[in-house]
Amino acid sequence: MTATINPDRPPSPDAVVQQGDATTPPAMDRPKSLAATTALVIGALGVSYLAATHGVKQAGLLALGIGLGIALFHARFGFTSAWRQLVSVGQGRGLRAHTVLLGTTATFFAIIFTTGIGFGVTPEPSVDPIGVGTMVGALLFGIGMQLGGGCASGVLYHVGSGQSATVITLLSFVVGSFAATWRYDFWHETLPSFGSYSLAEDIGYGGALVVTLLVLAAIAAVSLLVERRRTPPPVAPVPTAQGLARIVRGSWPMWVGGLVLAVLSALVLMTKGSAWGVTSAFAVWGAKVAQALGMHPETWAYWQQPGPAADLNGSLLDQATTLNNLGIIVGAALAAAIGGQFVIQRRIPGRVVAAGILGGFLMGYGARLSFGCNIGAYLAGIASFSLSGWVWAVVALVGTWLGLKVRRRLGLATPAPGDGVC
């Protein structure tokens, strides 16, 4: 199945089909059935192969990624869209879904860090330093995700659901992530850094959780006040089946998506020992391609750090983040195909391509500078009770405002509240 992209409205899996008075997902035609079967076979073979050759842990990481892709697609869980809707029209529904995800994940993380439970690993919180480089990175990421039409996790599940235009953003994302590793030492050693701060280290995980939940509740309340003052237009409906069929062929409420993603995030933490992340893998992919082309990134300061050095020297199938990312693509493809919404797009307008290239590069570069993206820096940081997560959110929100202005400069209309998800 193919589709033509409207240049003023970025591609989205939210296209609806009206049947009478009900909004229902399209029926599964032959191409979609083939896509579903292919995704299912690839996922099953991938998990089986990893279990046999690399161990249960690696197989589990791929399986968790598949679960994340399914949840992201079915819930249309928006990071880019939630902030865009808040800034552009005062719609706070997406932001309130964030508070559900953040609060539930923080609760799970507090239990995990307090008890130390893990599957053969000792889970560690994501507490990153705050500096000029970190804030520049968050600002660039906020701008980039509005130009590229998706965040890090969104780009992956959009690719999986058949949105070929997003492949351009993903490739540029990889280039930007790799490029940022070249002068990584300048951004984090030459420029000022203010160190890291963990609320849990001051008042314990119980106290830090209470404070975090209160702050999130306040944010949700403020979003409701903003809505009442600005009266945003209603969010467009999305295709959904009814009853139990909605689990596999429909749109989940965003709060359900938040709960499912929180559970899966906790399982990722317990499996690999660190929180769910996305963009560190992109830098590794870019570096391995660069090496194949004769470059020597291993001599750069970034790749001489223990973690990145191990990722660069090892197999991609040994890297947890890569397996999660591949799983997200497969899971989204499976969910989209079963839901009758797997669509291959064509005739991509030049300005959409240009925005995708620029947005992807800015997101990639910014994510490396700021120790992650909306997942690794924002979700993992706040859920780990790190001040860095909150700083990232505030600065990226400013970037969102700037990104919407740049969109207009490029002749791309600001999407309506229900258009596009990430």
Image (tube, grey):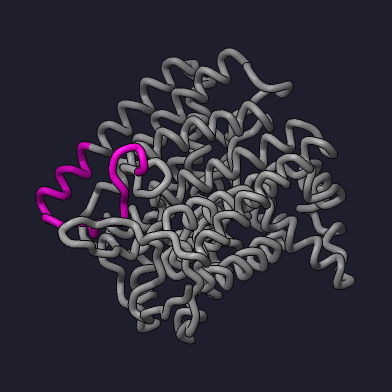
Whether residue 163 is situated above or below residue 42 in the rendered picture: below
Q: Where residue 391 sits: x, y (%)?
A: 45, 44
Q: Residue at x 31, y 51 (%)?
A: 240
Q: Residue at x 37, y 20 (%)?
A: 210
Q: In which quarter of the image is the C terminus?
A: bottom left
Q: Nearer the viewer, residue 98 or 189?
A: 98
Q: Where residue 188 sits: x, y (%)?
A: 65, 51
Q: How many labels does the image show?
A: 0
Q: Nearer the viewer, residue 41 or 141?
A: 41
Is residue 369 something that shows in the picture? no
Whether residue 354 is situated above or below residue 46 in the rendered picture: below
Please give left or right for residue 303 compared with residue 137 in the image.
right
Q: Residue furthest top?
A: 115
Q: Residue at x 77, y 36 (%)?
A: 51
Q: Where residue 223 sits: x, y (%)?
A: 22, 44
| Residue stretch rendered in magenta on the structure | 221-246
Q: Nearer the viewer, residue 339 or 329?
A: 339
Q: Does the magenta stretch include residue 356?
A: no
Q: Which residue is drawn at 89% across and 71% down?
A: 294
Please give left or right for residue 119 compared with residue 209 in the image.
right
Q: Is residue 226 magenta?
A: yes
Please give left or right for residue 395 compared with residue 109 in the image.
left
Q: Where residue 324 sits: x, y (%)?
A: 64, 45
Is residue 272 something that shows in the picture? yes
